[in-house]
Structures are given as structure tokens and as C-alpha cells.
Image: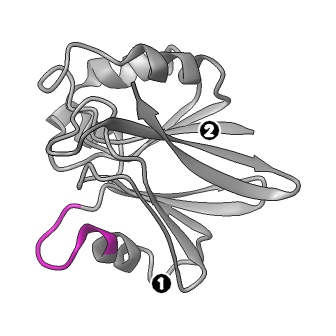
Amino acid sequence: MKIVVVADTHLPKRSKGLPEQLKEELSTAEQIIHAGDWQTIEVYEEFKKYGEVIGVSGNADDEVIRELLPTKRIVSCMGYKIGIVHGDGKGKTTEKRALETFQDDEVDIIIFGHSHIPYIRYVNGVLLFNPGSATDKRKLPVYSFGTMTIDEMGFSTKHVYVK
């Protein structure tokens, strides 16, 4: 199963649209996970054109998105439990806030956003994965998003850097 992982799209505020490289990956994805800060319902609807979308709301989302999507969720995919959260809050790093959000849950992977910084690291046996942002790189040299493959052999994640 191929999953495209995105966060912090901030459309239309930060960009005019999704980059072509992301659209290409979305067209072959079986599922899309978005870790918040879509900005508007139109962005959610745009992702839905490509397939099943699982997401959470973030701190910069409008009221419609906040009513539609939770701030935290856990989904099961081929035997793996995936925690999804935006990661905003006060104090601590975004990574620590994301990890603490699921401290009482059994998850294999935590997908988060907020920092716009691509991140991948295991902490206490849990993979923390931030895809970065395909539309708002802030001070980073490139835009990014992620892909995840899950099959009977396990799972793998990688960052895709937008050209």
C-alpha cells in the first residue's frame, strides 16, 4: 500500500496550488495522510480528488476544517497503528509534543507537522515522521512531502524533495 504523507499546505495563503511532483505522487497513492494546517475546506476537497484522505486539523485551520477533523487520531493500516497529530502547542519541541500526545496509546508510527521541517527518527521503538511542507518551506532550501509503503514485509517511509 502506498500512502502519501503531507502537512502544512497552508493554501491558498502560502502557495497558489499543489506542486506537480506532489500531484503525480497523489495520483498513484492508495491513501493520503495530512497532518494539519490545510487552511481551508477547499484544500481538503482538492486532496479528496486523489483518493481516501485521513487527516487532522492544525492550529492555522479555519473553523470548517476544525469541525470536520479531530486534532488527534489513530488509524490502523495492515496491522500497524499510525498516530496523526499536527504537533502545535506551547513549550517543548514539536517532536516531543507529538510523542507526548500518544504516550498513553500503542502506536507504531506518529505522523506530525507544524514545524515544516522534514523529520524521521525512532524514539522508544516508535517512528516519528514529519513530511515537511510541499508548499511552505520557510527557511529551508527545498519543499518536501513524504511517502510510506506498507506491505506484508513491514513499512518504509521517505521524504520526497520537490524540485
In the rendered structure, the answer to whether residue 11 lies left or right of residue 98 reads left
Residue matched to label 2:
3
Residue 56 in picture, x, y percent from top left? 37, 47
**Image height of 153 relative to 89, above or below:** above
Residue 120 in picture, x, y percent from top left? 47, 62
Would you identify the image quadrant in which residue 106 lies? bottom right
Labels in figure, total: 2
Residue lying farthest to the right in this orientation: 152
112 vs 56, nearest the viewer: 112
Residue matched to label 1:
104
Report the magenta residues as a range: 88-95
Would you identify the image quadrant in which residue 142 lies? top left
Residue 8 in picture, x, y percent from top left? 27, 40
In the rendered structure, the answer to whether residue 128 lies left or right of residue 106 reads left
Q: Residue 94 magenta-drawn?
A: yes
Prevailing secondary structure class for the magenta stretch in the rendered image: loop
Amino acid, disc 1: Asp
Colour convention: one colour
55 vs 25, nearest the viewer: 25
> Closer to the camera: disc 2 or disc 1?
2
N-terminal label among 2 and 1: 2
Mark 1: secondary structure:
loop
Query: Residue at 19% of width from left, 20% of height from top?
Result: 15
Q: Residue 151 magenta-drawn?
A: no
The answer to whether the residues at label 2 and label 1 have Cβ atoms under 8 Å apart is no
3 vs 83, nearest the viewer: 3
In the rendered structure, the answer to whether residue 10 lies left or right of residue 117 reads left
Amino acid, disc 2: Ile
Density class for disc 1 (Cα within 10 Å; few <14, some 14-19, many ≥20) is few
Q: Where does the N terminus fall, quadrant-wise? A: top right
